[in-house]
Every structure is written in structure tokens, then in C-alpha cells.
Amino acid sequence: MSMGKTARKKKSGRKEVSQTPSTRPIPNWLLLGLALIGMGITLYLTLIVWTGKSVAGCSAGSGCDLVLNSRWSMLFGLPTSFWGFLAYTALAGIAFIKSDSYWKLAWTVSLVGVLYSIYLTSVSLIELKAACPYCLSSLALMTVILATVAGQRPGSLPNFSWGRWLLWTGAGALIVVITLHLHYEGLWGKNLGAEEPETRALAEHLAKKNIKFYGAYWCPHCQDQKEMFGASAHRLPYIECSLQGSGGPQARICNDAGIKVYPTWIIDGQRYEGVLTPEELATKSGFKRGLP
């Protein structure tokens, strides 16, 4: 009987130890240091976008330039790098959380960051056939952070199972990335609604006058141009110049026309490079308001 009591005491003692929260230095210096590096990279890219300056090491027309100026470089009207900055800032803040709950937060943020970075890198390599060293650096850094967080998992997390944890967090992160992909593809986000009669009339007028609108599917300014016409954008006299991706040869019709900038409009033999508002297009093409 005394041996049974002793065994129960030992068993009870082990249970108490397993429930005792682990102690660790605050802040988590390794996580904080890596997050600060990421904040520096993404803050630099964000400020470059907002100030309109050139990115160091990215000459005009280079792969880096194509990626950083593609439609994937913006998300909900803000630079993609800005969202990355918020993610790294969150990780830096998490490094100061004392309880073991910090680990689940750090894992979730870094996992979403890695999968989203993989998605963007895949798009740049497959769709744009280009690469950005800054983007690749951020992907590598976020991967290191995820591996670091995985190695720092507290042993005191109750009822923890790697299999169950990976299933739930992986599925959640994939849903986030797929949702963002659908947004980039235009399957959700802005509701184009019904066509406005005057906007439709202008688009049809431009097409009837044999005016040309040259662009590329990956060009954000071309997307901006189309969005100005809302549901009537498909009526514009648009010519796709990048049938084989940004790394492929320019379409012959665009090359013969000497197109160097997207978008480019040819109106009555006059070349206009850059986005034109509907009002400017109406004036330059001789469109009369209220008339087709």
C-alpha cells in the first residue's frame, strides 16, 4: 500500500511539472532580430513605391522592375511590401509576449507569410518569367523564421499534436492564399455592376474610330486604365502585347507599331503613352457627350 501511495505521488508530481509554463528570455532575440531584418527590406520597398523612386539594383525593364510593377505588387490598393512589413512588425511584437501562446501566433503569421511568398514567387517565375532578388530574400527570410519558430516550440503546450496542428494551420493558410489569388484574378473584390450608357458609348466610339489601346496583362497601369471603364472595359479596342509573358517576345503587331510603354494609345495617328482618363480620351477622339 505504501508503494502505491509513493507511485501516485510521483505520478502526481510529473503531472504538475508538465503543466508548469516554461520560462524563456524576453524578448525572443532571435525572432526579433530576423523580424527587424524583414521590416527593413519591406519598409524600403514600400517607401520606394510611395515616393516614386527607383529600387536599387533594379534597372528599367529588368526582371526585378517587372515584378515590382506588376499587378501582383499591389493588394487592396496598398503595396504588397506594406503587408509584408505589417507581418514582420507583428512577429517583432510577438517576440515580446511572455506566455507560451506567443508560439502559436508566431507560427501562424510566419506560415501564412511563407505560403504567400511562395505564391508570389511562383507567379513571377511562371507568369512574368522574371525574378526579384528583394522578393526572394523576403521568402528566404520568412522561411528561416518559420523554421526557427518550429524549433522553439514550448514543451508545455497542452495536448499538442504536430499532425493535427499542421493540418489545421496549413489548411487555414492555404485558404488565405487561394482567396488572395481569386482577388488578383478579379473573381471577387470590385463589383463592376451594370454598364453606364455614356461610358459604354465612349468605349464603342473608340473601337469604331479604329483607335488602338496597346497593353500587357501583367501591367498594373493597363489594369487601372480598364477599371476606368468598369463593365464596359471589354468594349475597348485593346491589343495584348505580351501573349507569351513578360519574358517572351512582344506580339508582332505591337512590335511593328513601335510600342515601348504600356499602356499606349494611338488616336488619329498620334501616340499617347500612359493612362488616359475617359475625359481625355473623349476630347482627343472627338467624342461628343450624349452621342455615340
Image (spheres, grey):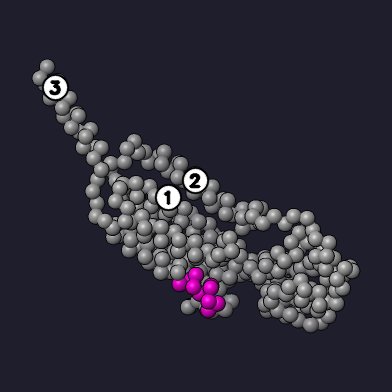
Kindly identify the amino acid type of the residue bearing the numbered disc 2: Gly
Quick check: 170 left or right of 230?
A: left
Q: Residue furthest left?
A: 2
Displayed quadrant of residue 38: bottom left
Kindly identify the amino acid type of the residue bearing the numbered disc 3: Lys
Q: Which residue is mark 3?
A: 5
Q: Is residue 284 above or below residue 32?
A: below
Q: Residues within 10 Å of mark 2 (few under 14, many from 20)?
A: some
Q: Residue at x 85, y 71 (%)?
A: 289
For the residues marked 3 and 2, what is the alpha-carbon distance in whole angstroms? 47 Å
Q: Which residues are magenta?
A: 44-53
For the residues marked 1 and 3, what is the alpha-carbon distance in whole angstroms? 44 Å
Depth check: give the residue in front, 202 or 67. Answer: 202
Q: Secondary structure at mark 2?
A: helix
Q: Which residue is mark 2?
A: 172
The disc, 1 or 2, on the residue closer to the chain's N-terminal end is 1
For the residues marked 1 and 2, what is the alpha-carbon distance in whole angstroms? 9 Å
Q: Secondary structure at mark 1?
A: helix
Q: Residues within 10 Å of mark 3 (few under 14, many from 20)?
A: few
Q: Which residue is mark 1?
A: 108
Q: Residues within 10 Å of mark 1 (few under 14, many from 20)?
A: some
Quick check: 205 left or right of 231?
A: right
Q: Residue at x 32, y 63 (%)?
A: 33
Q: Position of residue 251 (x, y in %)?
A: 72, 71
Displayed quadrant of residue 183: bottom right
Depth check: give the residue in front, 139 or 43. Answer: 43
* Contact between labelled residues 3 and 1, with CB atoms less than 8 Å apart: no
Q: Position of residue 99 (x, y in %)?
A: 30, 48
